[in-house]
């Protein structure tokens, strides 16, 4: 039976782009997502003329774990 042998908390701030690359990197590195939370944060920037524009940012918090590898297909 596989059990988690390592846990890690990841936090990523993403502004406007897709979080898919962040998730792909986690999976490629062997992490399995245990908990996921997304916080929407709105920042304002001032542009020419004194107008402010809202910028939406996402803060993604992930707790992930790695499982031990009991694979018999590995060659020593």
Image (cartoon, helix red, strand yellow):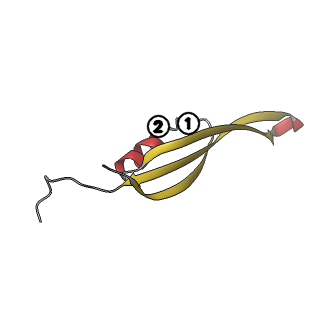
Q: Residues within 10 Å of mark 2 (few under 14, many from 20)?
A: few
* Front in this rendered view, residue 46 or 76: 76
* Residue at horizontal 12 percent and vertical 66 percent from the top: 76
- The percent position of residue 21, horizontal first and vertical second, equals 45, 42
Residue 28 bears which disc, if any? none
The reply, left or right, for residue 25 in relation to residue 42 is: left
Q: Quadrant of residue 38?
A: top right
* Front in this rendered view, residue 36 or 72: 72
User: In whole angstroms, how far apart are the C-alphas of marks 2 and 1?
Assistant: 9 Å
Q: Quadrant of residue 49?
A: top right
- The percent position of residue 63, horizontal first and vertical second, equals 54, 49
* Residue at horizontal 63 percent and vertical 40 percent from the top: 15
Quick check: marks 2 and 1 in contact, CB under 8 Å?
A: no
The reply, left or right, for residue 3 in relation to residue 64 is: left
Q: Quadrant of residue 40?
A: top right
The reply, left or right, for residue 74 in relation to residue 7 is: left
* Residue at horizontal 51 percent and vertical 57 percent from the top: 8
* Residue at horizontal 82 percent and vertical 38 percent from the top: 48
Residue underneath mark 1 = 17
- The percent position of residue 6, horizontal first and vertical second, equals 44, 59
Above or below for 11 versus 56? below
- The percent position of residue 3, horizontal first and vertical second, equals 38, 52
Q: Residues within 10 Å of mark 1 (few under 14, many from 20)?
A: few
* Front in this rendered view, residue 15 or 50: 15
Above or below for 52 versus 32? above
Q: Residue furthest front?
A: 1
Residue underneath mark 2 = 20
């Amino acid at each position: 039976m596989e059990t988690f042998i390592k846990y890690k908390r990841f936090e990523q701030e993403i502004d406007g782009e897709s979080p898919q690359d962040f998730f792909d990197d986690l999976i490629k590195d062997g992490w399995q997502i245990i908990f996921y939370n997304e916080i929407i944060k709105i920042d304002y920037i001032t542009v020419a003329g004194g107008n402010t524009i809202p910028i939406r940012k996402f803060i993604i918090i992930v707790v992930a774990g790695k499982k031990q590898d009991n694979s018999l297909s590995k060659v020593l």
